[in-house]
Image (spheres, rainbow, N blue to C red):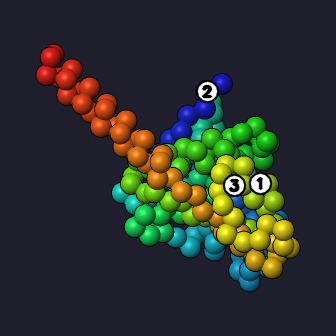
Amino acid sequence: MTDVFVYTTPNDERSQPLIEALIIEYETRYGNFYGEPARNELSRYPAELFAPPHGAFLLLIRDGQTIGGGAFKRYDEHTAELKRIWTHSDLRQQGLARKVVTELEEQAARQGYTRIYLTTGFRQPEAKELYLRSGYTALFDVNADPEVYRHLPFEKDISALAAQLSAAAVSASSDHDLLRQAG
């Protein structure tokens, strides 16, 4: 049993289990609360927004099956916005969502972002807890009734991670150059 991250697009057929499961989950949790079907929310952004150089879309694959995934898109020059974090409902509470979030943070840092922004719905308490446990700062009163906010915004400074990954890339590049020159 090996888990592998695959960077792809929302149009990849392997992403369909993620998209369809999110639609069902959003419809189950929110119904018509927002005045439109969940499918509209999931098709709100074109796939190109989740592609490099400004975005990324990844799937977590186990034994050929999509078991998780997520994405980010550009929010502003320094900020990536996480979207569509999902894990298979049968595999929750195993740390997979945290793996997805960590991988997205690292990729955002590699792409030059120094801050992450995200929102989650008020009827997703497990997502709220995931982000708090993952070092995100709530941009709302966590003691208030979450329904008054509708969307729960979070942020995280990843500037130290970006600097660390940049330094590692420079070091690896220097080592590679030395090996190439010696070879």
Q: Is residue 50 visible?
A: no
Q: Mark 2 or mark 3, which is nearer to you?
A: 3
Task: Determine which residue is flagged by label 3.
Answer: 131
Residue at image coords 25%, 26%: 176
Q: Quadrant of the C terminus?
A: top left
* First-in-chain label (2 vs 3): 2
Task: Determine which residue is flagged by label 2.
Answer: 2
Residue at image coords 20%, 28%: 177
Residue 79, image x and y in percent?
A: 47, 64
Q: Secondary structure at mark 2?
A: loop
Q: Label 1: few (<14), some or many (≥20) within 10 Å?
A: few
Q: In the image, what residue type sits under mark 3?
A: Tyr
For this orientation, the residue located farthest to the top is 183
Residue at image coords 62%, 59%: 84
Q: Residue 124 versus residue 167: which sits nearer the camera?
A: 167
Residue 64, image x and y in percent?
A: 60, 34
Q: Are marks 3 and 1 in contact (CB under 8 Å)?
A: yes
Task: Determine which residue is flagged by label 1.
Answer: 129
Q: Is residue 90 left or right of residue 54?
A: right
Q: In the image, what residue type sits under mark 2?
A: Thr
Q: Secondary structure at mark 3?
A: helix
Q: Is residue 41 visible?
A: yes
Q: CA distance from mark 3 to mark 1?
A: 5 Å
Q: In the image, what residue type sits under mark 1?
A: Glu
In the rendered image, the vertical position of residue 158 relative to residue 61, given as above or below: below
Tally of numbered discs: 3
Q: CA distance from mark 2 to mark 1?
A: 26 Å
Q: Mark 2 or mark 1, which is nearer to you?
A: 1
Q: Secondary structure at mark 1?
A: helix
Residue 87, label in figure: none
Residue 139, image x and y in percent?
A: 67, 69
